[in-house]
Image: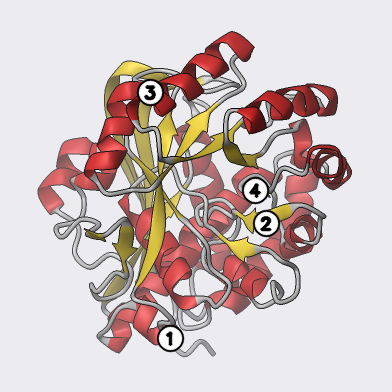
Amino acid sequence: MSDLPIERIVARVLEAPLEDHVPMSFSQLSARRTFLVEVHAGGEVGIGESWINYPDWAATERLATLLEGVAPLALGCDALDPGALLDSLVAALGGVGRQWGAHGPIWQAISGIDIALWDLHGRLAGTSTAQTLGLVRDSAPAYASGVGPTKVHELTERALELGLTAVKTKVGFGQETDRATIAAVRETAPDIRIFADANQAWTLEEAIANTTWLQQEGVELLEEPVSGDDPRDLATLHEVTGIPLAGGENVYGLENLVRLVTTEGLVHAQPDVAKSGGLTVPLRLAEQLDGTGCVLSPHWYSGAIGLRASITLATTVTHAGWIELDVRANPLRDDLVTDGFPLREGHVLAPGAHGLVGDLDADAVSRFQVHSDERSLS
């Protein structure tokens, strides 16, 4: 018998169109979208988020995967044991993901449930989820994300206004564009630290060639440089160039994440809470970082709930690094939670609301909602 059975699961799709599309090395972001997952149990509601940035039709797939695939297995299960539920869902649906060739959508749907359960965990305890996990620090250093290849001066200035000391530039658009991005950051903020994210745009040979000039321009950390995140390629790139590496947002399953973090040169593990297994899998990964030379720096480039969950991770695990703070406008991050994401000297403060997110702004949810559906025990 479940101690606290899950009674109802609600999915909400929120969308905010973008006037200017955001380019990526592999595609472009045409709208801000977030997929909220509500888990109802014991008279309380936990709120999670599943990643649907890409493709444009991701919300349609996620509704089906969550409500037709995951929800029937989760309803009636114990809401008080996120780890046990995640393990059972992965065991039940892992084979489907292999046959489908779509591990990502399965993990991303399960991640939304897991985040909601951890939010519920704190709400039921009457405190923040960070407090229930055990705070080890009251804040985490943040870097500005989403800088380039457009609006580089504007976004770098925004980073300075927020008191941030590092920016992560988007590269992988060809050397001319990439060089212009780095130059614009340097022109705007000569002393700021620069990281770079290629979003797996390069072959190993291209990564080696590009890393050479990136290092000459003072780039000190390179994220997802090679296609497929092959640990052998990453190790070779580090061996040849010495560049410190980051990655993990597109790696699924604890075993694969452990393989990544034990790769020579990988110094920042970046699981994404809405993709890589909610809080449960990153918490398990954090337990295995001792002695690896790697820290947990959660990846995040979406809405409010996942950012709160990422900050919770970075303030409750021992081996923690940076928080990713997207400095482009995003109403699905900024308008959904009432007290925002306060900063102190370039550090994001640990969330203090009950659960992960506290109360969402109901008017904002209604304004941006484009679809909702649910499943229940009845």
Q: Position of residue 331 (x, y in %)?
A: 23, 38
Left or right: 15, with 115 as reference point: left
Image quarter in which the C terminus is found: bottom left
Rendering colour mode: secondary structure
Name the amino acid, label 4: Ala
Q: Nearer the viewer, residue 27 or 201?
A: 201
Checking the image for residue 134, the label placed there is: 1
Which residue in the structure is indicated by mark 3?
Answer: 187
Residues marked 3 and 1 touching at CB (< 8 Å): no
**Residue for point 18% across, 46% down:** 335
Query: Compared with residue 316, is residue 110 higher up or lower down, i.e. above or below?
Result: above
Alpha-carbon span between mark 4 and mark 3: 25 Å
Give the mark toward the camera: 3 or 1: 3
Res. 378 visible in picture:
no
Which residue in the structure is indicated by mark 4?
Answer: 246
Which residue in the structure is indicated by mark 2?
Answer: 267
**Residue for point 27% across, 83% down:** 127
Q: Position of residue 135 (x, y in %)?
A: 40, 82
Dot 2 lies on which element?
A: strand
- Disc 3 crowd, CA 10 A, few/some/many (<14, 14-19, 20+): few
Q: Earlier in the sequence, mark 4 or mark 2?
A: 4
Residues marked 3 and 2 touching at CB (< 8 Å): no
Name the amino acid, label 1: Gly
Q: Earlier in the sequence, mark 3 or mark 2?
A: 3
Alpha-carbon span between mark 4 and mark 1: 26 Å
Dot 3 lies on which element?
A: helix
- Disc 4 crowd, CA 10 A, few/some/many (<14, 14-19, 20+): many
Name the amino acid, label 3: Glu
Residues marked 4 and 2 touching at CB (< 8 Å): yes
Q: Earlier in the sequence, mark 4 or mark 3?
A: 3
**Residue for point 23% across, 72% down:** 353
